Amino acid sequence: MMFKRLSARSARLSVLLAASLLFAATPALPAPVSVVDDAGHTVTLAQPARRVLTLSPHTTELVFAAGGGDRIVGTVTYSDYPPAARDIPRVGDNKAFDLERIAAMKPDLAVVWRHGNAQGQLAVLAKLGIPVFYSDPRRLDQLPLTLERLGMLVGTADSAHRAATAYRQRLTALRQTYAGRPPVVVFYQVWEQPLMTLNGEHMVSDVMAACGGRNLFAAEALLVPTVSTEAVVAGNPEAIVTASMGATQASRPLVDLQHWKRWSGMTAVQRNNLFTIDGDLINRQGPRILDATEILCKQLDTARSRRPAGTR
């Protein structure tokens, strides 16, 4: 009798052991991931994305920085950083996509430029059933959050968190070094004909602020307003800044600041505070914006050093 009870108990233990081993050997199903993008939309995936489209140069840089570069299956013209991005198949440019090719790639996530991509084509992506993450960071502090959200979507949360932490530390150091210095009024020139600039909602304006700069046209209503030469001269900026040619090849020459020398009474001209920054650094809303910030901070320090004695 005792033998029968022991045998029954052993049989039950064997069943439980086998069940536990089977459970342990069964791989856990990927958990759904959900984040909020820069348009305020909730993006939910059944599992982390493995086939990603990046439809602007800056979103390509963001996904790479978040650790997901090997998941990008298609991108657009001028996505040239990091160097590995140059080998990714192209599906068009910012304004026009090859939608048939995109559909054939079967992406499970598209990371797009909210205001830089063609809205009609972005709507088609949604109709194709492709989840879309809209990227449009306006403040330097938003970028590390974007990195972490993208890391969650592509399954590289740890790498993205490390990148975000390094970014935050560098930004804090730049602000501690420069933000409290005497202010410099800056005119940022986007284009010459028509004369265009950026208002205070643009990330470049936040870059200026990190360096102790003040955007001459921060109060303008439009993100990229057209202004008059007379308004610039009347505002008398202490420095004028524009983007220079970087790795990206533009279809027409970038802005030159030499024409401002005709207004010799303007402080920026008198002190030769006419500065340029690599356009790929200052115009892309990716981690390299801190490279541009460091350059601008040094340029504004140069402007301070050129003030008359006793006014610095």
Image (spheres, helix red, strand yellow):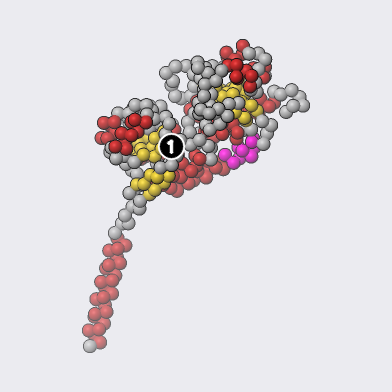
How far across and down, in percent of the image, does residue 302 sit? 65, 26
Residue depicted at x 26% and y 82%:
6
Q: Residue at x 26, y 31 (%)?
A: 100
Is 244 on the left or on the right of 173, as rendered?
Answer: left
Q: Nearer the viewer, residue 75 or 17?
A: 75
Q: Is residue 160 magenta?
A: no
* Quarter-of-image position of residue 257: top right
Residue 176 counted in the magenta span: yes
Instruction: Estimate the x, y position of residue 156 in percent, counting from the top left.
Output: 41, 46
Above or below, 64 against 187 in this view is below
Give the percent coordinates (x, y) of residue 207. 57, 33
Residue at label 1? 135
On screen, residue 45 above or below 273: below
Residue reaching furthest to the front: 221
Name the residue furthest top. Answer: 262
Q: Quadrant of residue 218?
A: top right
Residue closest to the far right: 310
Q: Main secondary structure of the magenta part?
A: helix
Q: Nearer the viewer, residue 1 or 53?
A: 53
Q: Is residue 139 above or below residue 300?
A: below
Along the horizontal axis of the image, is 261 left or right of 145? right
Q: Secondary structure at mark 1?
A: strand
Name the side, left or right, on which 92 lies relative to 271.
left
Q: Is residue 173 above or below residue 292?
A: below
Q: Over which residues does the magenta segment extend?
A: 171-179
Q: Is residue 15 something that shows in the picture?
A: yes
Q: Position of residue 166 (x, y in %)?
A: 53, 43
Residue displayed at 37% across by 26% down: 95
At 71% from the left and 24% from the top, the residue drawn is: 307
Q: Quadrant of the C terminus?
A: top right
